[in-house]
């Protein structure tokens, strides 16, 4: 499959969607430029080697000097990051709780913590449940962010739990941006190819909100570079289409 990036503005919010309750004031609520939830697929379609490449991609990207430079270049010069893993409707986990990153030392500390975290793998793929869990994670953030972003990565379509679109629309109605990083694997998932191209599925059913976009990783080997490019855009809040 030829390399490409798909950029799309998110779907319109449903007027009937419930709104987030205001977060209570926190004495330790330091400001950040963006609250970023990294929501990562750990379903059984992701084997051990692919899971390692996926985690290494996030570790390398967050601690990359260009990403750290983008973080420091923000109005506040810091971001809040939480790392979530999800599989079927029965499994979502906060692997790394919220951490404020404002420089290389903190970025490297985050990367080391992810390397030490245990990993589980469960059946099925529930993007909708991953989004709902990420929504709760955002509600519980100890920092005050000027923007809120959920970064969803995965290698399959939703096949567990509720449909994706209502979960997406609830978040969009609350001002959250959902960006996607579909991993287009040449191997079929459990012997079956997705019903539609995965990049199209993410564009149409997963992403949403102000400036939402999709970056395609053509395989797990290229995942790290795709994460880096995506994080730079998310952290910097760059407007308009970007060809990667």
Image (spheres, rainbow, N blue to C red):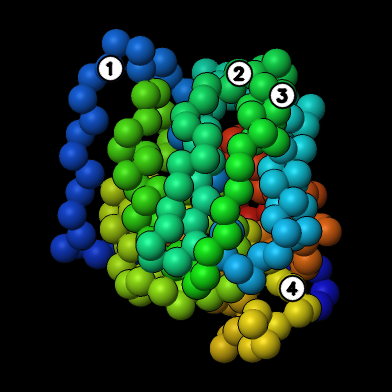
Within 10 angstroms of label 4, few (less than 14), some, or many (20 or more) residues? some
* Residue at numbered disc 4: 185
Q: Is residue 143 above or below residue 16?
A: above
* Residue at numbered disc 2: 102
The answer to whether any part of residue 11 appears in the image is no
Asked if marks 3 and 2 touch (Cβ < 8 Å), the reply is no
N-terminal-most mark, 3 or 4: 3
Q: Residue furthest top?
A: 27
Q: Is residue 52 above or below residue 138?
A: below
* Residue at numbered disc 1: 26
* Residue at numbered disc 3: 108
C-alpha distance separating marks 1 and 4:
43 Å
Residue 168 spot, x, y in % from top left: 37, 62
Label 4 or label 2, whichever lies nearer to me, is 4
C-alpha distance separating marks 3 and 2:
11 Å
The quarter of the picture where the C terminus appears is bottom right
Residue 60 spot, x, y in % from top left: 77, 38
C-alpha distance separating marks 1 and 2:
20 Å
N-terminal-most mark, 1 or 4: 1
N-terminal-most mark, 1 or 2: 1
At x 77%, y 67%, the residue is 218
Please give left or right for residue 45 compared with residue 23 in the image: right
At x 61%, y 37%, the residue is 117
N-terminal-most mark, 3 or 2: 2
Residue 237 spot, x, y in % from top left: 56, 39
């Amino acid at each position: 499959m030829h390399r490409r990036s798909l950029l799309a503005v998110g779907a319109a919010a449903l007027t009937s969607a419930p709104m987030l309750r205001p977060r209570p004031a926190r004495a330790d609520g330091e400001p950040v430029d963006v609250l970023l939830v990294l929501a990562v697929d750990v379903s059984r379609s992701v084997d051990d080697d692919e899971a390692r490449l996926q985690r290494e991609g996030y570790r390398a990207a967050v601690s990359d000097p260009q990403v750290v430079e983008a973080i420091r270049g923000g109005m506040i010069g810091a971001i809040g990051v939480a790392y979530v893993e999800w599989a079927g409707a029965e499994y979502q986990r906060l692997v790394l709780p919220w951490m404020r990153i404002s420089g290389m030392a903190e970025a490297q500390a985050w990367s080391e913590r992810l390397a030490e975290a245990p990993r589980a793998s469960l059946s099925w793929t529930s993007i909708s449940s991953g989004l709902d869990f990420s929504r709760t994670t955002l509600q519980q953030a100890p920092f005050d962010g000027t923007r809120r972003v959920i970064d969803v990565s995965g290698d399959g379509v939703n096949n567990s739990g509720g449909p994706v679109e209502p979960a997406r629309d609830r978040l969009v109605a609350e001002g959250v941006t959902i960006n996607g990083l579909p991993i287009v694997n040449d191997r079929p998932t459990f012997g079956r190819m997705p019903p539609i191209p995965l990049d199209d599925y993410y564009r149409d059913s997963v992403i949403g909100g102000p400036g939402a976009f999709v970056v395609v990783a053509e395989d797990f080997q290229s995942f790290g570079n795709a994460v880096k490019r995506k994080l730079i855009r998310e952290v910097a809040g760059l407007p308009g289409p970007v060809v990667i």
